[in-house]
């Protein structure tokens, strides 16, 4: 519901003493607070030059510290010329008593003059807004405060003292802001630590799921088929058990506060490595390979296995019939590609699929129990090895390309 604001009513009822002036200082509007405070009517003020409506007290014309009218005129001229608001320090500006010409009452004001731009960008109006501080100034005098306006002191001394007090308040506000910023930074750091801890739990659960699923599949097959080749089954069970052991060891290594690395790095033949990893699996789709040999990279075997495993898991979820795995070189990089013939990824989603917990609609339909972490983990592993992982163009299906720095062959002793 849109609320319509009556700006004229707001101006009229505003608590500060306000008047709208033309750029040559003619009063065009005044609010009720000004009329009450100065005991005037609108008919007496509208159309009057502000300095004619409120003349200067002739009894203090010779006092340089009391010429509030001159200070006000200078402020209004500055606002009209620059289009910038001006905040005036407390000024004495006596007001002539109603019905007693030539008799002035001592009054003090704190005033802000604000430009109101017109449709063409110039200053069409000036909003003069004042707060009366007469009671405060007289109290300062009463208690003998040396810089109270109206005492026998120079105006610049008054302003210097006010400026010093303002600086003290500004510094205190700065210290409070710095404390607030430190507290916010501490809270943010704690929130980030909690987020990372939850993320680690997600990642570990995701990594553990693949070998556990493999173990369950082999055991179910063994129970369902009594005449299965037991040695072949045991080899697969052993490999999945080894994978579980490696993941647990890596998690324990991550948990150590003094751990500099998460796993051993070694020189791997990427083609041989990919062939070994494919042999561990029993994919639902046909796998076509093109694995060049002697493509050497320096990597953590367990982490690279996670990366490839996550890419293959993703391909199996989306493939219609076929998955392709290729290893090639484009010096100075080794390239591993995993391609499926599924529905593919829209160009707008090719970066989003690497976000944690983000899942395409097709993935949710094919694998409702998935976590949406596999590709995010794979990219992090690639980056940790100085490489890159991205989704690339392909005529049909999805194509993920891993690029890793080529490594020099190990020195044989």
Image (cartoon, grey):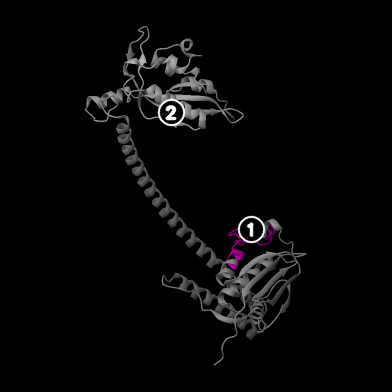
x 39%, y 52%: residue = 182
x 49%, y 73%: residue = 262
As for residue 284 lying within the magenta part, the answer is: no
* Few, some or many residues within 10 Å of mark 2 (<14, 14–19, 20+): some
Quarter-wise, where is residue 162 in the image?
top left
Q: Height in image: 174 above or below 87?
A: below
Quarter-wise, where is residue 320 in the image?
bottom right
**CA distance for labels 2 and 1:** 52 Å
Residue closest to the eye, 404 or 353: 404
Front tag of 2 and 1:
2
x 72%, y 69%: residue = 339
Q: Which residue is mark 1?
A: 352
Which residue of the protein is positioned furthest toward the left in this rendering?
144
Q: Which residue is mark 2?
A: 112
Image quarter in which the C terminus is found: bottom right
Magenta-drawn segment: 354-378
Residue 386: x, y in percent? 57, 71
Q: Height in image: 321 above or below 362?
A: below
């Amino acid at each position: 519901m849109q609320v319509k604001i009556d700006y004229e009513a707001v101006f009229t009822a505003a608590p500060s003493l306000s008047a709208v002036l033309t750029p040559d200082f003619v009063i065009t509007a005044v609010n009720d607070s000004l009329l009450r405070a100065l005991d005037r009517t609108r008919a007496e003020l509208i159309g009057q030059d502000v300095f004619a409506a409120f003349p200067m007290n002739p009894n203090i014309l010779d006092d340089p510290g009391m010429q509030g009218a001159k200070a006000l005129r200078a402020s209004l001229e500055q606002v009209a010329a620059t289009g910038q608001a001006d905040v005036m320090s407390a000024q004495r500006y006596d007001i002539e008593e109603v019905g007693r010409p030539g008799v002035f009452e001592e009054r003090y004001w704190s005033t802000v003059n604000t430009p109101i731009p017109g449709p063409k960008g110039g200053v069409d109006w000036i909003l003069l807004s004042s707060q009366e501080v007469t009671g405060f100034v007289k109290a300062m005098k009463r208690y003998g405060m040396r810089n109270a306006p109206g005492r026998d002191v120079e105006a610049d001394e008054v302003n210097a003292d006010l400026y010093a007090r303002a600086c003290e308040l500004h510094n205190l506000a700065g210290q409070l802001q710095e404390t607030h910023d430190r507290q916010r930074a501490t809270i943010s750091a704690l929130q980030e630590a909690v987020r990372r801890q939850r993320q680690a739990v997600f990642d570990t659960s995701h990594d553990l799921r693949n070998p556990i699923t493999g173990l369950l599949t082999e055991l179910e097959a063994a129970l369902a088929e009594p005449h299965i080749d037991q040695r072949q089954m045991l080899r697969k069970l052993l490999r999945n058990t080894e994978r579980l052991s490696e993941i647990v060891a890596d998690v324990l290594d991550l948990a150590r506060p003094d751990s500099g690395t998460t796993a051993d790095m070694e020189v791997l033949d990427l083609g041989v490595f990919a062939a070994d990893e494919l042999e561990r699996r029993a994919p639902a789709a046909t796998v076509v390979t093109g694995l060049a040999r002697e493509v050497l990279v320096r990597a953590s075997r367990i982490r690279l296995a996670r990366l490839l495993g996550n890419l293959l898991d993703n391909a199996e979820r989306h493939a219609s019939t076929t998955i392709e795995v290729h290893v090639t070189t484009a010096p100075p990089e080794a390239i591993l590609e995993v391609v499926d013939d599924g529905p593919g990824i829209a160009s707008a989603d090719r970066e989003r699929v690497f976000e944690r917990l983000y899942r395409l609609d097709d993935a949710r339909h094919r694998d409702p129990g998935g976590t949406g972490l596999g590709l995010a983990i794979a990219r992090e592993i690639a980056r940790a090895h100085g490489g890159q992982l991205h989704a690339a163009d392909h005529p049909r299906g999805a194509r993920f390309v891993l690029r890793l720095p080529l490594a020099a062959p190990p020195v044989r002793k």
